[in-house]
Every structure is written in C-alpha cells, then in structure tokens.
Amino acid sequence: MKQELHLTDDQKKQLLELARRVVEARVLGVELSIKQPSDPVLNELYGCFVTLHVDGHLRGCIGTFQACAPLYKCIEEMAGESLNDSRFVGHRITADDLERLDIEISVLSPLVKTHDPLSLTLGKHGIYIQNGHYGGCFLPQVAAETGWSKEEFLSYCCLHKAGLDAEAWKDAQTDVYLFTAEVFSERQFAKPG
C-alpha cells in the first residue's frame, strides 16, 4: 500500500458521485447496482471517511482506517453507514435534505504510531488515540475548523472521542497515531451560480 494517495479531480468526482448515488438510493429506498471502476487507483486499498453536511451542519460521519476492500467499495460502504451515524438517530437525512446535502470524502494514509504526539502538524495530521478498548479519532480538518492548539486537539480527542481522561495522550499506555487525508467535497466542484 502506498503512503499517501493523490487523486485527480476526475477520480475525486467519481468517488463523490458514487457516494451521492449510494446516499440517495438508501434515503429513497431504491436498489442500486455499483460496477467496479476500470481506474486501478480506485481499486487500491485505502481507508476512508464519508461526512454528510446539510446546510453546513454535520449530519453523519463514518469511516474506517482498515483498508479491507478497494477504495470504491470502502466509499460505497461508508456512504451508506454515514446515514446511520448514532449521533443523529433522531435527525436522519431525508429526501427533503438531499438537495442541500454536501458530501465530503477523506481518503486516509496508513496510521503511523508516534512517540511524540506534539510532533503533529495541525491541519495536516489527523489523530487516532487508543488505550485498551477505548479509542477515538479526529480527521485533520477538525483542527482547522475549531482553531484548537495541538494540546486541545489531543485532549478533546481523548475526552470526547475516546472516552479517556483529557490528559491520556501523555500516558505511556496510550497509543497515538498520526495520519494524513486527502479531503474533498461536492461543494468544491459545485458550479457557481
């Protein structure tokens, strides 16, 4: 597996179109048949996250670090699962939301364990923090969206994502992994006007 993936605009559009088709089919309750793309890059193994926003508000985000299927299959699965994000049980995406929906995809590099969590670069690195059965992550874009410092980024992930003490990232028993992501969304390719 390659360390990082650099997708062309055409590849990004294909993945976004795939995610859109999956989300719309699930919301509308229609069958969908997905064909394997001929592009070899879309058949490589990478983890990914699919994030759903309606009118700029988060309405679902599900992903996997484990690349156990080709990228296009991973996108297909995560797009469907993002509709079932447990944080939005009472506020699921509906047919009325589809027109205002913006889909964002993050294609992930492999996780790299770090012994110096503060070596991360805000806005470039995402984090995955694990201690025993507890674990949680933040995608790289979270730091840019929140304006947090490195310490806040690590502490909020421990506390709010991993269910650990806010300072757990400093504990030798806690594993901190860094990763990068190629992030793109439908909004980025929307035609003006």
Image (spheres, grey):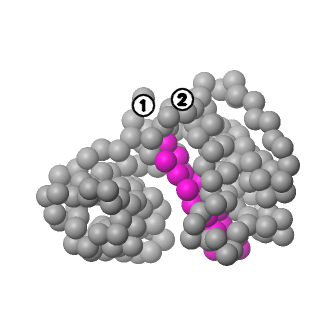
Q: Residue at x 60, y 24 (%)?
A: 40
**Cβ atoms at labels 2 and 1 below 8 Å apart:** yes
Q: Which residue is drawn at 75% across and 57% down?
A: 190
Number of the label disc, if any, that sits on residue 161? none
Whether the magenta-drawn stretch holds residue 55 is answered as yes
Secondary structure under tag 1 reads: loop
Numbered disc total = 2
Of helix, strand and loop, which mostly describes the magenta segment? strand
**Res. 55 image quadrant:** bottom right
Which of the marked residues, 2 or 1, is nearer the chain's N terminus? 1
> What is the magenta range?
47-64
In this view, the residue in front, 42 or 62, is 62
Q: How far apart are marks 2 and 1 (CA)?
A: 9 Å
Which quadrant holds the C terminus?
bottom right
- Picture coordinates of residue 97 (x, y %)? 79, 69
- Picture coordinates of residue 26 (x, y %)? 77, 53
Q: Name the residue under label 1.
A: 2
Could you tell whether 169 is left or right of 24 in the image?
left
Is 179 situated above or below 44?
Answer: below
- Picture coordinates of residue 32 (x, y %)? 81, 41
Amino acid tagged 2: Glu
Which residue is farthest left? 172
Could you tell whether 45 is left or right of 135 in the image?
right
Amino acid tagged 1: Lys
Q: How crowded is mark 2: few (under 14 residues within 10 Å), some or many (20 or more)?
A: some
Q: Residue at x 32, y 56 (%)?
A: 133
Q: Residues within 10 Å of mark 1 (few under 14, many from 20)?
A: few
Q: Which residue is drawn at 61% across and 32% down?
A: 42
Whether the magenta-drawn stretch holds residue 56 is answered as yes
Which quadrant holds the N terminus?
top left
Q: Mark 2 points at which residue?
A: 44
